[in-house]
Amino acid sequence: MNAGDTAFVLVSAALVMLMTPGLALFYGGMVRNKNVLGTIMQSFIILGIITLEWVLWGYSMSFGPDHGSIIGGLDWFGLKDVGMNPSADYGSTIPHVAFMIFQCMFAIITPALITGAFAERLKFSAFLLFVLLWATFVYNPLAHWVWGVGGWMGKIGALDFAGGTVVHISSGVSALAAALIVGKRLGYGSTAYIPHNLPMTITGAAILWFGWFGFNAGSALACNGLAANAFIVTHIASALAALSWMFMEWWHRGKPTTLGAASGAVAGLVAITPGSGFVGPVSAIIIGALGGVFCYGGVLLKSRLGYDDSLDVVGIHGIGGTWGALATGLFASTKINPDGANGLFFGNPGQLWIQIVSAVTTMVFAFIMTFIILKIIDGVIGLRVSEEDEVKGLDISLHNEAGYSL
Amino acid sequence: MKKIEAIIKPFKLDDVKDGLSGLGVKGLTVTEVKGFGRQRGHKEVYRGAEYQVDFISKIKIEIVMESGLVAEAVKMIQEKARTGQIGDGKIFIIPVEEVVRIRTGETGKEAI
């Protein structure tokens, strides 16, 4: 056991925890003022529900003893056998419970990311049920495939340092399924859904950027050079994507916007996530710069294709996550991480193929499972609030509160 | 007694207020309002999506005064709020039946 590593992972877990309330502000500022609390609540309360799920069965399904390379068993239900001593497989220098709580924060933020797709119209009961089922049947298997000992994606050599497939592709593709099934907001096409508080959104983006250092650097599970590398490439990619998105928008629409700079920063963080433990700083410049450009294109896609992904989860997490997974197959280098692999540009084209296989499988699995889960919930309790409640706003109709008073 | 209601461009408020004070106007009420006239709205862009915003922010000033002062006040507002561009606003003049000062119960001219 190493005191420095333990302190680092615990602090990183706390940083990742802060990302979810940060996301709540990021999303909350982008909706109309009648839905600010309803939107913030959808992120905030996941801290409650997924913590319980994770401790009871989520951690065991994700990281417990492997069954057929597909799923962990329930041997660690209620954290049985997950103790203060290090686990041989997950961070051999830190307490097993420290790894568990670090991973818990990832399990929390992932479904919270999806909530942007159905913002301003989902019933609260349907939302709670969705989060619980999605975590159990989509997140836990995916986490096991990629990071669990014996998981098949890890076995074929897919590289995903901090969650490009598990967190971002999965949430982005699930968001697409959700936007299609839940349907458009009332007044789509005629109503202007103008963000009601962009300073709140920028504050949220800044908290996400800050917390992401824990997300990526903490994924080294030790306070070492690899963690420092992950820290700097994370920062570089975010900086570059904020710039590239801003310049794209300036060129395309005539004005640089704060929402564009903040969206770009998040897109860069998404794009660097899977490669943060495998790529160097110059690669991070390219990954970030192109991440901002691709995600800007990604958010334009929704009006072309006509689905109402309210807060652009598909455009940022789906597109950014996919770019990140592929970019890892291009830019990974064993000079950065000897335990990783080389990518296409470092003489190993096979790695790109492995990354494509893992990204596409994640997309198909997450899309189909989310589709099924939402159809079942729709059939049993219904997904959307009534038209009257949607017009009134979720703050009053679901929570009996108003975000702002005179 | 008359009430003057003027809709003006927000950045002209200070000029108008100073001008009216110079005429001896003792008080005025200001409200932030939105609306459209010939100027119509403007465009806003969020994440590359363009929205037409029909209502533009303006300032509404309300002043109650003796009828004798009205012509001068209207001239002052027009002079101070004018840019010559479309969207400079409008001035409405409305008759006032009675004014009561809440603290003292005074009415009419004394209450203005």
Image (cartoon, rainbow, N blue to C red):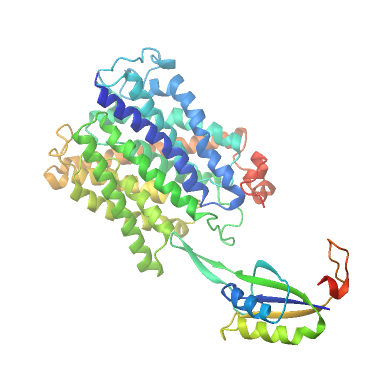
Up-down: is A376 above or below A25?
above
Please report the residue visible at 36 percent of the width from the left and 28 percent of the height from the top.
A102
Residue A400 is situated, as x and y percent measured from the top left of the image, at 68, 40
**Lateral position of residue A35 relative to residue B70, left or right:** left
Of residue B27 and residue A370, the one placed in the foreground of this image is: B27
Please report the residue visible at 36 percent of the width from the left and 12 percent of the height from the top.
A81
Could you tell me which quadrant the N terminus of chain A lies in?
A: top left
Please report the residue visible at 80 percent of the width from the left and 85 percent of the height from the top.
B68
Residue A22 is situated, as x and y percent measured from the top left of the image, at 45, 42
Of residue A208 and residue A272, the one placed in the foreground of this image is: A208
Residue A390 is situated, as x and y percent measured from the top left of the image, at 64, 48
**Lateral position of residue A326 relative to residue A121, left or right:** left
Of residue B83 and residue A129, the one placed in the foreground of this image is: B83
Of residue A4 and residue A12, the one placed in the foreground of this image is: A4
Residue B69 visible here = yes
Indicate the quadrant where residue A106 lies: top left
Up-down: is A99 above or below A364?
above
Up-down: is A62 above or below A391?
above
Residue B26 is situated, as x and y percent measured from the top left of the image, at 73, 74
Residue placed farthest to the top in the image? A81
How many numbered marks have been drawn onto this rendered protein structure? Answer: 0
Residue A312 visible here = no
Indicate the quadrant where residue A230 lies: top left
**Lateral position of residue A64 relative to residue B76, left or right:** left
Please report the residue visible at 59 percent of the width from the left and 62 percent of the height from the top.
A190
